Image (cartoon, helix red, strand yellow):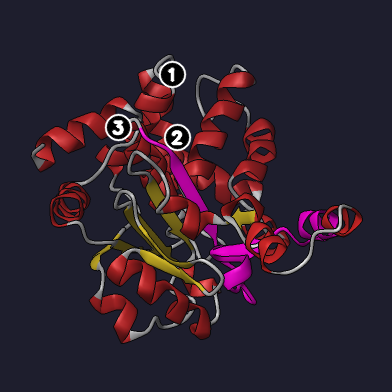
Amino acid sequence: MSWKDLQTALSGQGYVASDDLSVALQLALSLGRPLLLEGAAGVGKTEIARALSQVRDTRLIRLQCYEGLDAAQAIYEWNYQRQLLAIRAAAEDGETGKAVEDRIFSRDFLLERPLLAAITQDKAPVLLIDEIDRADEEFEAYLLEILSDFQVSIPELGTIVAKTRPVVVLTSNGTRDLSDALRRRCLYTYVEYPDRGTELAILNARSPAIEAHLANQIVGFVQKLREEELEKTPGIAEMLDFAAALMGLGIADLTDDPAILQSTLTTLLKTQSDQARITPEVAGRIAGRAA
């Protein structure tokens, strides 16, 4: 599949990818390398993994990163409750020793977390490691074995080698610097906010029933709003929520009712200071320039 074919297939799933992103994805697929996507929150980094799993008709496995994430939560852990029950049952039956130990440390008692689950699928899944920059630096070391050799070492079982090699997409919002070791193992691209034409195509793909005039106004309004000094810049998901709110209220033109327009800004502005900054006068000014 060429990058153009991939771009078309993603569009069929409602994801409008830029040429640069489509080429990066195609290279990641053809070279079998993880792809690291950096960019501001809300530009569609997470959504690309969902769309890619749909294009490939395979499972999406997501690991949401956060501070304090460790191997037990990301790779595997033992089902201690089931192990205790098995030990008690064995004791009641008079079983002891290595036979019991071998049984309770078998795959039947292993809880697969996302990283282990991703390498034990019969069909290669898309593994999304979301917001890797939120995890601790120490956690990146756990990823290196997975991303280098696609295998997991479990002391009680040995090394589990991948049945199939997952397609790995990592995302980062840039809240901290990632290690050089992690970056070396990945292809990389920076995802920008879409330009007006691309964002309009996204809106039309997700809301095909929207009137052309309103669609142009919505995209223009959101693009202008991003130029304001905001704490939380609205992303693509917020733009789609804004459009859905306006359509649900039967609004055909952003300038028709300033009060309704102001009320729908709750879909775009997610902090008190941002809502205070975009007054009805400011919203009206932006709406007047949005077409």
Q: CA distance from mark 1 to mark 2?
A: 10 Å
Residue 71 magenta: yes
- The mark closer to the camera, 3 or 2, is 3
Residue 189 point in image, percent of width and height: 24, 63
Q: Which residues are magenta?
A: 58-87
Residues under numbered marks 3 and 1 in contact, where contact means CB atoms less than 8 Å apart: no
- The mark closer to the camera, 1 or 2, is 1
Identify residue type, mark 3. Answer: Val
Residue that appears at 87% across and 60% down: 91
Residues under numbered marks 1 and 2 in contact, where contact means CB atoms less than 8 Å apart: yes
Provide the residue designation for mark 3.
Answer: 55
Residue 245 point in image, percent of width and height: 61, 28
Q: Earlier in the sequence, mark 1 or mark 2?
A: 1
Residue 271 point in image, percent of width and height: 68, 59
Identify residue type, mark 1. Answer: Ile
Residue 36 placement, left or right of 62: left
Provide the residue designation for mark 1.
Answer: 210
Residue 66 drawn above or below residue 244? below
Foreground residue among 104 and 162? 104
Provide the residue designation for mark 2.
Answer: 218
Residue 118 placement, left or right of 17: right
**Residue 27 showing in the rendered view:** yes
Mark 1 burial class by Cα count in 10 Å: few <14, some 14-19, many 20+:
some
Quadrant location, the C terminus: top left
Callout 1: helix, strand or loop? loop
Residue 168 point in image, percent of width and height: 34, 56
Q: Earlier in the sequence, mark 3 or mark 1?
A: 3
Mark 3 burial class by Cα count in 10 Å: few <14, some 14-19, many 20+:
some
Q: Residue furthest right?
A: 92
Q: Earlier in the sequence, mark 3 or mark 2?
A: 3
Residues under numbered marks 3 and 2 in contact, where contact means CB atoms less than 8 Å apart: no
**Residue 274 showing in the rendered view:** no
